[in-house]
Every structure is written in C-alpha cells, then in structure tokens.
Image (cartoon, grey):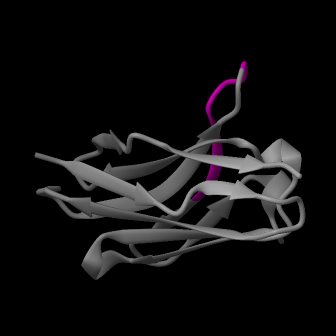
Amino acid sequence: QVQLVESGGGLVQPGGSLRLSCAASGIIFSIYHMGWYRQAPGKERELVATITSGGSTNYADSLKGRFTISGDNAKSTVHLQMNSLKPEDTAVYYCNVLSGSMTYYWGQGTQVTVSS
C-alpha cells in the first residue's frame, strides 16, 4: 500500500520560513519525480515544485527564489524549504509522487497558514 506522509506545516508570520517534508513508502516501481502542489481556498490545485530522480527541478515561476525543493531518491523523501512567506502562500500543500509506472500518488495534505 502506497503511503505519503507529510509533515512541517503550521502557522507562521509573514516573512517567516517553514520546511515541509514528505516520506513515501510502498511504491513498487522507481520514482520518476516527487514534488509539491498547493490549493488555496476557492482556487484550483497548482504546482509548487518538482524534483526528478536525477535531481532536475521545476518551480512555479512565481515561487522561484523563495522556495527550494530537495529530495533523497534512495530514501523516497522530498523537502520544501519555504522562505519569505506571504499571506498568499496560505494553502494546503500536497506531496506528489509520479512513479516509474507513470502512476500519480498524493499525500493527505498539510496546512500552511501565513498570518500575523
């Protein structure tokens, strides 16, 4: 059974930082990429960043420079360092895995709230 376990969400003041982590288990085939998406209230889910097993990264243009994705393919873990957080970054952040069999898996989501 595939499981994605996310951690690190919470409440932070504007300008602060948070680090999200996700650990995947039970994926039979190799991982093509791991990443993060987010969904704010009333909005569609959107890409935050992905990282392939080879280390190539892809970011939403609006987040480049503030967010950094990193991963350990051997451990099936992915992290998202979020700096200079803004109220508009408030959302549920979802861990995502695309396996080598081209199957998508999603975590349950972790809430990030940026507010003073």
Answer above or below: position of 19 versus 111: below
Percent x, y for residue 60? 74, 52
**Per the image, is 48 magenta?**
yes
Percent x, y for residue 73? 33, 76
4 left or right, relative to 62: left
Q: Residue furthest top?
A: 42
Percent x, y for residue 50? 55, 59
Q: What residue is at 82 percent from the left and 69 percent from the top?
A: 16
**Per the image, is 53 magenta?**
no
Counting every numbered tag in the picture gives 0
Q: What residue is at 62 percent from the left and 31 percent from the top?
A: 45
61 left or right, relative to 32: right
Q: Which residues are magenta?
A: 42-49
Percent x, y for residue 58? 64, 62
Q: What residue is at 78 percent from the left and 48 percent from the top?
A: 89
- In front of the other: 34 or 115: 115
107 left or right, relative to 74: right
73 left or right, relative to 94: left
Q: What residue is at 87 percent from the left and 54 percent from the top?
A: 86
- In front of the other: 34 or 21: 21
Answer above or below: position of 85 versus 17: above
Answer above or below: position of 31 versus 93: below
Residue 30, image quadrant = bottom left
